[in-house]
Amino acid sequence: MTELLAFHRTAMATAVDLVDRVERFDLATPCAGWDLGRLLAHMTAQNLGFAAAARGEAFDPGRWAEVPSTPRAFADSAAEVVAAFAAEGAAEREWPLLAGADQEVRVPGGTAIGFHFIDYVVHSWDVGVSIGRPPVFEDALLQAVLPLAFEVPLTGPARTGPYAPFAPAVMQVPDSGPMEQVLAVLGRDPNWKAPSPEGDGA
């Protein structure tokens, strides 16, 4: 668990650095239909919701509400979730997480940390490729996230429906690296490129 928490901190620090570099929040992202502003709202809300769950607070859908965010608010939420995950006893508790629009699902703390870790490896990539700065994670971190990514069911509510956290897996390129494998199995096209912003003369 100590190693997982260390990798999670790295993923969070990477996400904070990338979000801080965003200059336009209307840019497209690999998340279908979401621009960077919507993605940032989602990421901030997830941090706050997971942090509350890690602290053992009673389930409240309002803690997970997505509202417009800023790089500063996101950085604060990232610091909050990292601290909550590292608190003594947090990983040993069951956490009340959000399922669907407003339902509670209880998940072992260690499993929940894995969920958030996966999210932030992928969301760091989402932000990075949207601004032309794809993140480069060390191989040890990617080897840690890869088996977690392959544990996500390929069918069912994790993949389909309005509240599915992941899109259906996409075809993997033979001999692709661990980051490309993580992205593909979690429904991202590793070759996604940001479209040219309107008005840039391209």
Image (cartoon, grey):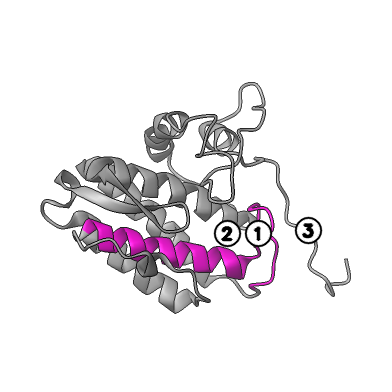
Residue 91: percent from left, percent from top: 19, 47
Secondary structure type for disc 2: helix
What span is in magenta?
Answer: 25-54
Please report whichever mark, 1 or 3, sits nearer to the chain's N-terminal start: 1
Amino acid carrying label 1: it is Ser
Q: Is residue 1 among what the camera can see?
A: yes
Amino acid carrying label 3: it is Pro
Task: Please name the predominant secondary structure of the magenta segment in the image.
Answer: helix
Q: Is residue 137 left or right of residue 33?
A: left
To which residue does mark 2 refer?
127
Q: Contact, CB < 8 Å: mark 1 with mark 2? A: yes
To which residue does mark 3 refer?
195
Q: Contact, CB < 8 Å: mark 2 with mark 3? A: no
Residue 196: percent from left, percent from top: 80, 62
Residue 142: percent from left, percent from top: 43, 37
Q: Is residue 48 above or below residue 173?
A: below
Q: Contact, CB < 8 Å: mark 1 with mark 3? A: no
Q: In this view, does 174 lie to the left or right of 1?
A: right
Amino acid carrying label 2: it is Val
Residue 146: percent from left, percent from top: 44, 32
Disc 1 crowd, CA 10 A, few/some/many (<14, 14-19, 20+): many
Disc 2 from disc 3: Cα separation: 14 Å
Q: Is residue 132 among what the camera can see?
A: no
